[in-house]
Amino acid sequence: MMEIRSAVFAGSSQELTGRPVARHPEFAFIGRSNVGKSSLINCLCAHGKLAHTSSQPGKTRLVNHFLINDAWYLVDLPGYGYAKMGREGREKLSEMIRGYVLGSQELVLLFVLLDSRLPLQKIDLEFMRMLGENGIPFAIIYTKCDKSGTNALEKQISENNAALLEEWEELPPVFRSSSKEKTGREEILNYIGTILKTL
């Protein structure tokens, strides 16, 4: 099993030129604001306060790099679709996200986080469509899986996956997670470990 022995904040940036100087493979996490991104990162790293969590959506406004095991980066990207931010602010964040996603030579995989309780949102589909059009490899993580009963969870995830298959020939890797119960932690880390072995 992939183990995280060390997780250190390595820097924040708005542009690719501001990234940490040392180059390592990057695994980035993104999703709509308040999808539980920072909580999941803290859960994966078994570190309560590595990524800043907040009940206020839109807290992450920069690209944050965390150096894991001195060997790879876990990258916390700003959430997209934050409604309470002005249009100019949203456009700036969108540019920052696109600049990183389309410009980082070290980006190995992007994890797109979706709230397991909600139907697939238009903004999520549009974002994944952009990834597909640009050949960016991604996987899906359904978050907050402890918040629904088993039947409701299965129904919602099945509906979401069916909606995705209307656009994609096959689904990308799909994981289920709960930061509270640490569900999915081992599977996600092992998947990252498997990819790192192929690089």
Image (tube, grey):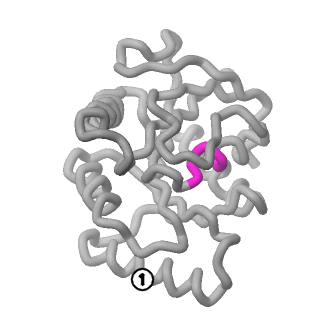
Residue lying at the far bottom of the rendered structure = 151
Residue 185 position within the rendered picture, expressed as x and y whole percent measured from the top left: 70, 54
Taking the magenta stretch, the answer to whether it contains residue 34 is no
Image x and y of residue 6, in percent: 76, 27
Is residue 38 rendered magenta in the image? yes
Q: Nearer the viewer, residue 155 or 140?
A: 155
Tally the marks: 1
* Numbered disc 1: secondary structure: helix
In magenta, the rendered stretch is 36-40
User: At x 32% / y 30%, what residue is drawn?
Assistant: 96
In this orientation, does residue 193 appear? no
Which residue shows up at 52% across the image and 55% down it?
Answer: 35
- Is residue 73 visible in this depiction of the protein? yes
The quadrant holding residue 38 is top right
Residue under the point 67% across and 84% down: 149
Q: Main secondary structure of the magenta part?
A: helix
Residue topped by disc 1: 159
Residue 78, placed above or below residue 172: above
Residue 93 x, y percent position in the rendering: 33, 34
Side of 91 relative to 145 (left or right): left
> Quick one: which residue is furthest to the left in this view?
133
* For residue 85, above or below residue 164: above
Q: Answer few, some or many: residues within 10 Å of disc 1's Cα (few below 14, many 20 plus, some between 14 and 19).
A: some
- Horizontal relation, residue 60 to residue 150: left or right: left
Tell me the kind of residue under disc 1.
Answer: Glu
- Residue drawn 66% across and 85% down? 150
Q: Position of residue 66 (x, y in %)?
A: 61, 27
